[in-house]
Amino acid sequence: MLDMPFSRIIEGLNYSLENVIAPEIESPIAKGQLFAVVEILNQIKGRFDHKFELVVEDIKVSQKALATLIETLSAASVEIPSEYHSNTEAIDLAAMTGEELREKRNQLEIIVSGALDLLDAHRADIPDAQKVEHAVFMQFGATIFRNMLLVGKYRFDKITQADKKD
């Protein structure tokens, strides 16, 4: 969900509020409050968008990981698809739209996954395969940890107690 545009998240949320939750609410006051929230969300959805600097960081991490994998695979004389090489070249990320950045990040994740598969397939020919694999996973681990820090604490205690009076 973190890689989804904010406007799409709001649209999905509003759809659920209006079409799933609202019909279950009997109180006209509570229903009115719900529709007020929907309206507020509609007003702010165009003012926010994905944190593109995070997507740019993800692209750079993927390119670095891919370069490491290519170097390791090349040293073992493994044939590497040309698209792997072209995806380590410098890109003018500042000129790309948010959608283009997300597409590039997704493409790189698929390519890095393919390079990891190649590493695994040729593990016997690569003396430091596990060390390289570990380094790549640690790079992505830092990105995952960053994303976890961005997500606020869920208030499941409040959510699960919705039918009880405060």
Image (cartoon, helix red, strand yellow):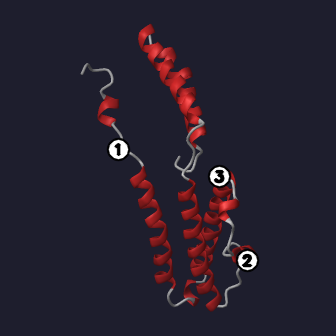
Nearer the N terminus, badge 2 or badge 3?
Answer: 2
Q: Residues within 10 Å of mark 2 (few under 14, many from 20)?
A: few
In this picture, is 37 found above or below 134?
A: above
Residue 57 appears at what percent x and percent y?
A: 54, 64
Q: Residue at x 57, y 75 (%)?
A: 64
Q: Given the image, on which type of amino acid does mark 1 rest? A: Lys
Instruction: Looking at this view, name the residue that lies furthest to the left.
Output: 166
For marks 1 and 3 on the same chain, the one whose residue lies earlier in the sequence: 3
Q: Of circles 2 and 1, which is in front?
A: 1
Cα distance between the residues tagged 2 and 1: 42 Å
Q: Position of residue 2 (x, y in %)?
A: 52, 49
Q: From the image, state whether disc 1 or disc 3 is nearer to you.
A: 3
- Crowding near pointer 3: few (<14 within 10 Å), some, many (20+)? some
Q: Is residue 105 left or right of residue 158?
A: right
Dot 1: element: loop
Picture quadrant where residue 63 is located: bottom right
Separation (CA) of disc 1 from disc 3: 27 Å
Please tell me which residue is depicted at 45% across the width and 8% down the height of the picture: 28
Question: In terms of image quadrants, where is residue 27?
Answer: top left
Which mark, by number, is residue 37?
none
Q: Nearer the viewer, residue 61 or 126?
A: 61
* Residue placed under numbered mark 3 in the picture: 98
Q: Hey, what amino acid is under mark 3? A: Gly
Residue for badge 1 = 153
Q: Which residue is mark 2?
A: 81
User: Circle 3 — which element?
Assistant: helix
Q: Is residue 78 left or right of residue 32?
A: right
